Image (cartoon, rainbow, N blue to C red):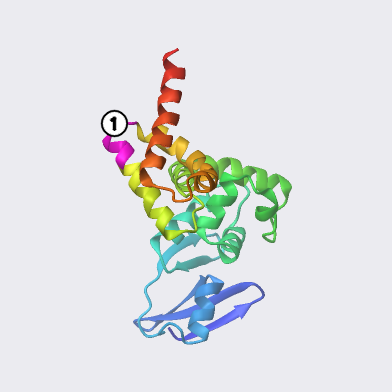
Amino acid sequence: MVELWQTNQKFFILINCQGLGYEVQILESFFLKLKTNQISNKNITLWIKHIKKEDSDLLFGFISKEQKNFFIEILSIRGVGSQISMGILNKFTINEVISAIRTQNKKLICSVPGIGQKMSDRLILELKSKFKSEISFAEEKDNDELDIKDPQMNKMMEDLQLTLQSLNYKNKEIKTILPIIVKDVDLLTKKENNLSFENLLKLAMNYLDTESSKIVS
């Protein structure tokens, strides 16, 4: 790297490649790390996206392949240019964008300069179809996460899930009743004083057997 600079909300580095200087636009987070010497500027690896126009050649550099691919996906949406794509990645992480798409958080998307209501609708609609697997994974992760602050209880719930699986209950059914069990924990604790794994297992099996009988009937 030879030099780095900022022009308005655009961030650049100049890379020397065998005597030729290449001007590359980068994300603000990477720019700040270089500027504050958090990253050595001697050995920099960037994933480059080259955009050729009639009057210019534009280079965009990313520190990961995922960032570059995400940039390309955003860029492929009608009406979205390179600066809006960079603006999205400057403001949010990939996971934050996917979360906004999943929850249809138009306000968050519209907070990026240059994005209005119509464009946010188009972004959410098109990116939702492009990142189906990522969105499904995020939803499954949310469903799997139980709000348990007590480490001992958290371990007990993990053991409960494994035990139910070993008893041939379906994983989907188990995940459905676990949040219910967590809500009942306080009540059980008050009744039993000393909550046991056997009590949890019995409660879970009652719920699962009840649900199974409903399906059969």
Total marks shown come to 1
Q: In which quadrant is the C terminus drawn?
A: top left
Q: In which quadrant is the N terminus drawn?
A: bottom left
Q: Amino acid at mark 1?
A: Asn
- Foreground residue, 140 or 126? 140
In the image, is residue 76 above or below residue 96?
above
Query: What residue do we see at 29% from left, 31% from top?
Result: 168
- Foreground residue, 60 or 52? 60
Tell me if residue 43 is in the magenta stretch.
no
Q: Quadrant of residue 170?
A: top left
Q: Position of residue 29 (x, y in %)?
A: 53, 73
Quick one: label 1, few (<14), some, or many (20+) residues within 10 Å? few
Query: What residue do we see at 45% from left, 30% from top?
Result: 207
- Foreground residue, 212 or 37? 212
In the image, is residue 115 above or below residue 213?
below
Q: Position of residue 81 (x, y in %)?
A: 60, 56
Q: Quadrant of residue 178?
A: top left
Residue that carries the numbered disc 1 in the rendered image: 168
The span shown in magenta is 163-169
Identity of the residue furthest to the right in this view: 117
Identity of the residue furthest to the top in this view: 217
In the image, is residue 93 above or below residue 22?
above
Query: Under tag 1, what secondary structure?
Result: loop
- Foreground residue, 199 or 32? 199
Q: Position of residue 8 (x, y in %)?
A: 67, 75
Q: In the image, 186: left or right of 17?
A: right
Q: Position of residue 162 (x, y in %)?
A: 31, 43
